[in-house]
Image (cartoon, rainbow, N blue to C red):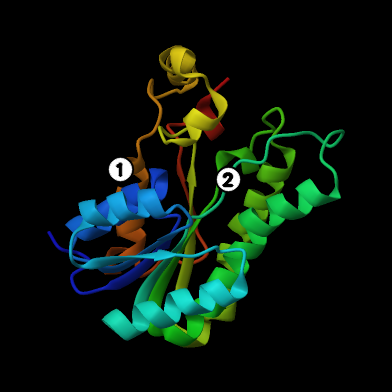
Amino acid sequence: MERLKNKVAVITGGNSGIGLGIALEFRNEGAKGAIVGRNAETLASSVAQLGDNFIAINADVTKLTDLESVFKDTAEKFGKIDVIVANAGAGAVGTVATFDEAAFDQAMDLNLKSVYFTVQKALPYMNDGGSIILIGSNAAHRAYANFTLYGAAKAAVIYLAKGFSSDLLDRKIRANVITPGTTDTPAFDKFVPAEQMEAVKKQFADQMPIGRIGQPADIGKTAVFLASDDSSFMLGAELLVDGGMTYLSK
């Protein structure tokens, strides 16, 4: 099937992890477009996997001038954009006792402000009837230790799907949000020593009602649904793709 044939997509944070998983599934369904990231090495390797119908754009989503260039360059290459995936973000680890103002601003700039302005800067280059896909986190629903700011930012992102959909009704642009749980991405490398990796992943899997942690393709397949006409009656919705963690775990 090619449910996204000839659709033009932009995926922020598309150079690794969940973002790359989404881009690969989009490619498999016939989409073309751009992946966006800050790491030149992973951008190059990821766009090589995606093939000739994708370009890589090195940009910082916390900088509005970078965002403007991303959408302008994509539209010049492929034409008007059909799908925006605002995926870029990162876990901000700390507590209310440890996060100072600079850390607060950095976490919110990346996980919330960038999402808002990714969508705003994309709008002049989007086709009416397009799809906006935001990436939340089940940390918005569960108070995980040391993830207070990250969870708060993602809770706001989940609301933005509703607000954006309301704002854009006249253009028939739908916004929805995917909320992943623990997913097997390179983010593990930042927090877990290599020798402990398998044990930590098994520990997470044992906590998941479904018995495994998520894979980027799990999120990618859900994103294909939201990007396609199959979800044309959905707007402002949240899809939990978390192995049952939010509602079924003890």
User: What amino acid is at disc 1?
Assistant: Ala
> Residue sitting at 32 percent across and 47 percent down?
21
User: What amino acid is at disc 2?
Assistant: Ala
Q: State the quadrant of the C terminus.
A: top right
The reply, left or right, for residue 228 in relation to residue 241 is: left
Residue 80 appears in the rendering = no
The reply, left or right, for residue 83 in relation to residue 94 is: left
Q: State the quadrant of the N terminus.
A: bottom left
Residue 13 picture location, percent across and down: 45, 55
Q: Please, is residue 43 above or below residue 116 in the view?
A: above
Instruction: Return the residue nearer the eye: 188 or 3.
Output: 188
Residue on which the image places disc 2:
90
> Residue sitting at 41 percent across and 27 percent down?
213
| Crowd rating for badge 2 (residues with CA inside 10 Å; few <14, some 14–19, many 20+) | few
Instruction: Return the residue nearer the eye: 63 or 174.
Output: 63
Residue 11 picture location, percent across and down: 40, 62
Query: Would you identify the image quadrant in which residue 12 lies?
Result: bottom left
> Residue sitting at 57 percent across and 40 percent down?
138
Q: Are marks 2 and 1 in contact (CB under 8 Å)?
A: no
Q: Secondary structure at mark 2?
A: loop
Disc assigned to residue 217: 1
Instruction: Return the residue nearer the eye: 163 or 30.
Output: 30
- Looking at marks 2 and 1 on the same chain, the residue that comes earlier in the sequence is marked by 2
Q: Please, is residue 187 above or below residue 26 in the view?
A: above
Numbered circles on residues, count: 2
Residue 44 picture location, percent across and down: 31, 54
Cα gap from disc 2 to disc 1, whole angstroms? 19 Å
> Residue sitting at 61 percent across and 68 percent down?
63
